[in-house]
Image (cartoon, rainbow, N blue to C red):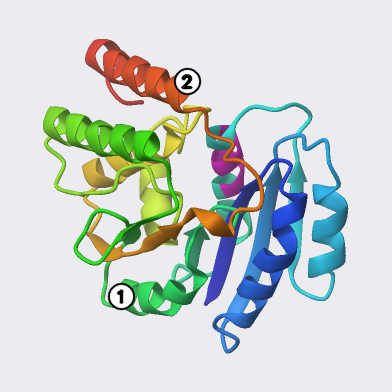
Amino acid sequence: MNLYFLIPVFNESVNLDLLSESLQKVLPEKKKFYLFVDDKSTDDTIRKIHALFQSKPYHIIEKEKNQGPGDSFNLGFEWILEHSEDDRDLIITLEADNTSDIDLLPTMISISGLNYSLVLASVYVQGGGFEKSSFLRKLISFFANIFLRLIFNIKVQTLSSFYRVYQISLIKRIRQNYTSIISEKGFVCMFEILLKAIRSDASIIEVPMILKSQKRKDKSKMRILKTMGQYIGYVFKLGFKGIS
């Protein structure tokens, strides 16, 4: 069984040293493969990945133009489906900016082994929360989650987190059921694939996580108002066209 780490990157050079240290230290007994999808970085992100991961199994997908995290995740999932040879493989998606708590990963992997096809790191379940995030960002995130959960009757608490563990069989099922794994290019992509997972009968569980924004060495790439607009647009699109 392989653990495939799927990590979208865009100008993450200053965060990569800590990310590399954390990823290579966790779960040393497991077979790990690191897949980076670069969204046309203008700093030395690609050079640093080569330097930091040269002794480990890794690959970089280099995009010709910036298309957003949804496009990066879709390319990464497709690449892993093409190269995976074991239906027991797991895919771990996470942020490159160190806000995903890597120390939580052994617990998430163990829970996945209890036949959960999707394990979510959640700031909203009991024991989870935020450190050093702005009040506005927390407020918008909170109400966006409530809004979407009510509209789509979703029981999951955290809808947009990157930090997840997928059984590869779930991604294959989504690929069979829909025209694409992810079609949305912006940050709404995480809600899209979650909705597709729910409608593909995924067994889902959430584990509490404290999101530590202070571990990020630069600003978040997510633009709050733009992302809110993408969510609203996606909801209207689903109303008219349905999920595809």
Q: Residues within 10 Å of mark 2 (few under 14, many from 20)?
A: few
Residue under the point 16% across and 41% down: 154
Residue 79 placement (x, y as % from top left): 63, 49
166 drawn magenta: no
| Helix, strand or loop under label 1 | helix
| Foreground: disc 1 or disc 2 | 2
Residue under the point 45% across and 28% down: 224
Instruction: First in sequence, mark 1 or 2: give its number.
Output: 1
Q: Which quadrant of the rendered structure holds the C terminus?
A: top left
Judge by depth and name the residue closer to the eye, 162 or 136: 136
Task: State whether residue 230 is above or below residue 130.
Answer: above
Q: Bounds of the magenta span? A: 71-76
Q: Main secondary structure of the magenta part?
A: helix
Q: Is 177 situated left or right of 180 in this image? A: left
Query: Disc count in the image?
Result: 2
| Helix, strand or loop under label 2 | helix
Residue under the point 80% across and 49% down: 45
Q: Quadrant of residue 84?
A: bottom right
Q: Residue furthest top?
A: 240
Residue 68 placement (x, y as % from top left): 60, 30
Three-letter amino acid code at disc 2? Lys
Residue for badge 2: 226
Three-letter amino acid code at disc 1? Ile
| Residue 27 numbered mark, or none | none
Q: Is 200 situated left or right of 48 in this image? A: left
| Residue 111 numbered mark, or none | 1
